Image (cartoon, grey):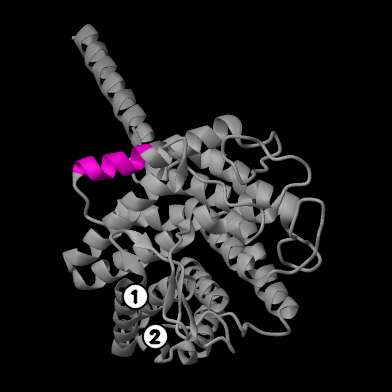
Amino acid sequence: MKNKLIGFIGILVIIGLAIFFIWRGKRAGLSGEGPWYHRADTASVALVENFWNKELYYCNYDSAGDTTFHYWPQAHALDVFTDWYLRSKDSRVLELYDQWYEGVPAANEGGFWNPYYDDMEWNGIAALRAYKATGQERFLEAAQRLWNFILPGWNEQAEGGITWKKGLEWSKNACSNGPGAILAARLYQELKRPEDLDWARRIYAWEKEVLFDNGAIYDNINAQTGKVAKFCLTYNQGTFIGAAVELYRITGERSYIGDAILAADYTLEHLTVEGDILQPEGTGDGGIFKGIFVRYFTQLILQGDLDADTRGRYIAFLAHNAETLWAAGITTDGRIGPDWRSRPGTPSAMTPQLSGCMLVEAMALLEREGLLP
């Protein structure tokens, strides 16, 4: 009898250990602390260590300490901080939020207003994400103030659209309409004001009518001449995709996902090098472009209700870009350049670092959602 009891206890112990290890494995999977979690830490920490100005509270323009202030990249730095915080709940990010909120308006002549409407849109989107991540009302208030600054940028030249810059009301650009539609749609989802959804639909419809061509998002139209500038940039592709995904989430209308797939496939076919790596776009403003594409392309993968083949193809594309970056495009101290196939020199620029962070954080997100092999 005693031997049977010992044997029974032994079986219970084995079963208990098995349950524990299964639970621990599932918990690790749910926490997302796989290889891309730690790689994202490396890239995002490197952004702070190499570019964050600890006195002025914004990102320097290069890793050698060029303090030239550029307003719109700071929005994408805030977005990367939010990616980092949502992934890790790292308390260091809360301090960065405090610093950013103090330093960026101070460097931008004391507030958030800017003559470039797209720049205000980027900061509005980033502020709204920071609000949703932290619950800090100041970020929601900033997003609403920015939206109020942006709305007068719509005029009826070229039959509508938000202008690119105050004083150039005839210049209607993809970069000032795609993000505008995203911000309007997200404000609607947060505040449920019908007028925000109306604006999201209206801006998107204008961009599709004027600048969309079977997946290509053309850069702008000059209302004075009626001429469309028929070249495409990855970030314009990305924000059109992002606006389509947001409107699909709200309305359930499949036509938006059809548009997004066309734009995504155009990008993968025409804006890549070696057939499958997103093209380098320089170390200035262009350094951020493909990171923006990655951000909204990832939302299409996650929220676009895609068929299995399309989702698998998109994940494989993103993973190949990320693996290439990690193998060949990042330095030992975590700095990233504009070409994900080669490491940057010294100094390196802030804008490509942001794109690299967005890519690696996107992979960590897909990993956390259980979508990676």
Q: Give the image location of residue 95, x and y in percent.
A: 66, 64
Helix, strand or loop at disc 1? helix
In the shown orientation, is residue 258 left or right of residue 325? left
In the shown orientation, is residue 65 left or right of residue 318? right
Numbered tag placed on residue 17 in the rendering: none
Q: Give the image location of residue 234, x and y in percent.
A: 46, 56
Q: Does residue 193 show up magenta in the picture?
A: no
At a point 44% along the width and 63% down the height, the residue shown is 236
Nearer to the camera, 141 or 344 = 344
Identify the residue at the far top of this view.
3
Magenta stretch, main secondary structure, is: helix
Nearer to the camera, 127 or 213 = 213
Earlier residue among tags 2 and 1: 2
Task: Quickly name the residue at label 2.
Answer: 158
| Amino acid type, callout 2 | Ala
Q: Give the image location of residue 39, x and y in percent.
A: 55, 39
Crowdedness of circle 2 by 10 Å Cα count: few (<14), some, many (20+)?
some
Q: Which residues are magenta?
A: 308-316
| Amino acid type, callout 1 | Val
Query: Which image quadrant is residue 223 in?
Result: bottom left
At a point 45% along the width and 52% down the height, the residue shown is 294
At a point 81% along the width and 59% down the height, the residue shown is 66
